[in-house]
Amino acid sequence: MDIIDGLWLGLQAAIQPTMLLYCFIGVFLGTLVGVLPGVGAMAAISLLLPITYYIPSTAAIAMLAGVFYGSQYGGSIASILLNLPGTPSSAVTSLDGYPLAKQGKAGVALFTAMTGSFVGSMLGLLLLIGFGSALSRAGLAFGPAEYFALMLLGLIAASAVGSGSPAKSLAMVVLGLLLGVVGTDVNTGLPRFTFGVPELMDGINLVALAMGLFGISEVITSIRAGGAGSVNARFSLRSMLPGRDEARRSVCPMLRGTAIGSFFGAMPGTGAAIASFISYAVEKKVSREPERFGQGAVEGVAGPEAANNAGAMTAFIPTLTLGIPGDVVMALMLGAMMIHGIQPGPLMVSENPAMFWGLIVSFGIGNLMLLVLNLPLIGIWVSLVRIPFSMLYPAILVFICLGVYSVNNNVFDIYVVALVGAAGYLLAKLGFNPAPLLLGFVLGPMLEENLRRALLLSRGDPMTFVERPLSAGLLLLCVALLSWAAWGALRRLIREPKPLADPQVS
């Protein structure tokens, strides 16, 4: 069956009233759980799994998929308006989205995020349709050595994230790696750096870390400034639309972000977080004015949002065509398919074409629903910032506590988010950007796992990382990025004028 026939078959299945209803329910719930900080798609899909027993199989998977990519849309709202990222990928959006909101451009930031999300999703969907099998085979070419080199590349690229010095960013990456070590070793089963605390056996809660670094830290900063850090509440319909210059600046970042997100989304085990960070780093490197990033650059919203949502679409490639889940959410989706007697894999297209193509078309319809649903709501979201900060920050703290507690139903995580928030405030005062720490925390365990797996397969021979052409090329790229950063720092040091001694000082 060719692509045209498949899409026609999928359209006939996707426009059924039952499919449209459950697709809308999925994207609506996805947006809702994305807006609520800390809830996330994984918790929502887990809660909805028992309900899918009573729903037709294709409609059930379309609904759960809608929750997944709908949460990518909603996740940017809390990040931009309140600096409350519930996921690492939405944390990247807050780096420039929240400064834009503080400048009175919350509507512009939200409009750019929605547009970037839609463009990334639809282009990622086209790649899923046209190159799904090819991208899956490319992902299978990656072994442990290649994944280690790729994770290392992502961590080095994180040093370019934010407006601080590369040395401070690298220090935050290393701190994130150290925090990622806490917990039970997956190979030996021994606890590491738990200090006898049973709650740390599973490691530090990612949501608690993200909300503490960004949300609690921002609340403390705003309280100490007497509410001066709150968002400008004045806005109009005209101010919600980006100007010509802002629209021009957003086009290329959206396309580059889509390419980056599609590549990483199609690779099992990477996910949208690393794609968002690398997209942000790329935009900062190619910009003629990198100093604008972190101060409210619209490119810092458009690129990562496109990468995030393109990765969400292409994450279905290995799941549907190979039966290999790329992350925890995709593992839940795979489990839901098996509950309904669906076996994803290379034979799914030929054995169950109506379901495969019906899901593909429903993804496109769901993204159109999200665009229609979210764009009119931008004014409502922006109106939230009219609430006085003295009333807003207690509500923010309540949402943080509820979101963190709901992940594991554990009070200990609330103590963690408070401690991390205080530490995040001190780090921010010292000029350290929290975003690289978060990426180091996310990628650290995967980096260690692939390093040990590659050495185990090579019987401890470290040459395995340079003997394989793909991993050797990625490591060379890592060296090139480090050299580039070192040369840039050295050149700035040489160019900076040295202060002259005051002749009046004896």
Image (cartoon, helix red, strand yellow):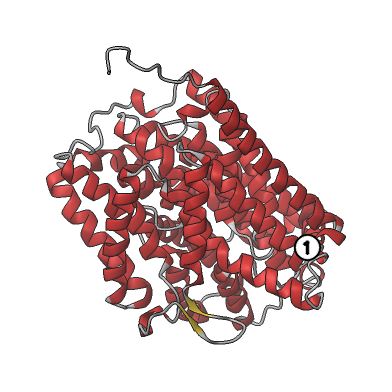
Total of numbered circles in the picture? 1
Residue ranking furthest to the front: 506
Left/right placement of residue 496 relative to residue 257 reads: left
Residue 110 visible: no
Q: Which residue is mark 1?
A: 142
Q: Is residue 437 above or below residue 322?
A: above
Residue 173 visible: yes
Q: Which quadrant is home to the N terminus?
A: bottom right
User: Mark 1: which amino acid?
Assistant: Phe
Q: Secondary structure at mark 1?
A: loop
Q: Position of residue 401 (x, y in %)?
A: 26, 65
Residue visible at 66% across and 62% down in the picture: 316
Residue visible at 48% across and 24% down in the picture: 246
* Mark 1 surroundings within 10 Å by alpha-carbon count, few (fewer than 14), some (14 through 19), many (20 or more): some
Q: Nearer the viewer, residue 448 or 67?
A: 448
Q: Nearer the viewer, residue 233 or 453?
A: 453
Residue visible at 71% across and 62% down in the picture: 147
Q: Which quadrant is home to the C terminus?
A: top left
Residue ranking furthest to the top: 503
Q: Position of residue 37 (x, y in %)?
A: 35, 58
Q: Position of residue 134 (x, y in %)?
A: 82, 56
Q: Is residue 122 above or below residue 146?
A: above
Q: Nearer the viewer, residue 171 or 198?
A: 171
Q: Position of residue 146 (x, y in %)?
A: 76, 61
Residue visible at 37% across and 17% down in the picture: 501
